[in-house]
Image (cartoon, grey):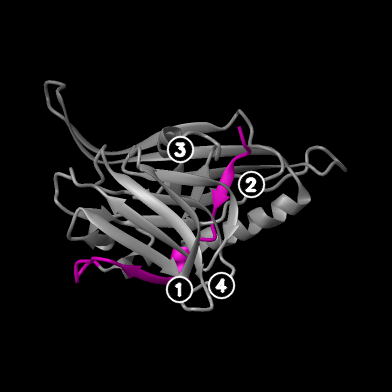
Amino acid sequence: MENCGFGWQNRVLDATLAASAQVGSLPVSNLRIPQGAPSLGWRAPATSAVLTVSGVPGAQWRAFSLHRTNLSASATWRIRTGSVNSWWGIDWHTDWSGPCNEANGQCVHVLPSTVTDERCEITITDTANPDGYLDIPLVYAGPLFQPVRNYSTSSTFGRTLGQDSVTSLGGQEFTSTRWYQRKYTISHQSLGDADAAVLDQILLAAAADRNVLFVPDPSADPATLAAQALYGRLSAGSDLSNPFGAADRHEISLTLTERL
């Protein structure tokens, strides 16, 4: 088990994006929009597509994730990272492929360690997709920040339901569900000074409406990663406190809500 990871330096937001296929009204550039609605995302009018994120020399890569997708249970993906060589070709340094293990509309892959490369390429294949096309509203591709000490076991996972409910004179309830949103309350009781400084940068980015990826255990298997990771809005649920005196240990509570 590894310490939790926060993905906040999303190269999708500042790199050059290219797609092998896209619908004119739903281009790949829509991946920079923070909302997770299919009507605001990237759509490929086929059951296979390639996303290239490039143009950032010295970019770091470790975590890759797709969110709010329409992928089926049989979807697969290939992820590789590389850099342009002196002959203007691409030297690929990492190359991984496997099932998406889609859960809650998302899939997550974490490399064993951080790699530095100019680009990453993600190939998504879902030949059994009942829609006949790929909807990919949100993508994260970039490094993970892992604090020296892990988050507390007092952290909680919950759900927020968006429902309209009407009760008749006879007591019958008629409910219309509009949305279902997952959330984490992340309690960290042993944050060092250096980690607290990075967390302040993460919260500053989140305040500017940047989504953050939270991975409870980056070493987990792909199915667990997809089921437990969350991508969305991060905020501080409490001030940073210093309950242990002179010790290099601070306490803070964070709230992460899934981006819909």
Query: With 220 as the anchor, is 33 left or right in this view?
Result: left
Of tags 1 and 2, the one toward the viewer is 1
User: Are discs 1 and 2 less than 8 Å apart at CB?
Assistant: no
Q: Name the disc covering residue 57, or none.
A: 4
Where is residue 243, by image quadrant? top right
Disc 2 is placed on an element classified as loop
Q: Name the disc covering residue 146, or none.
A: 2
Q: Is residue 2 magenta?
A: yes
Of tags 3 and 4, the one toward the viewer is 4
Mark 4: amino acid? Pro
Q: CA distance from mark 1 to mark 2?
A: 33 Å
Mark 2 / mark 4, whichever is N-terminal: 4
Q: CA distance from mark 1 to mark 4?
A: 15 Å
- The majority secondary structure of the magenta stretch comes to loop
Where is residue 254, by image quadrant? top right
Query: Mark 1 — residue?
Result: 89
Q: Name the disc covering residue 188, or none.
A: none
Disc 1 is placed on an element classified as loop
Mark 3 neighbour density, 10 Å: few (under 14) some (14–19) many (20 or more): many
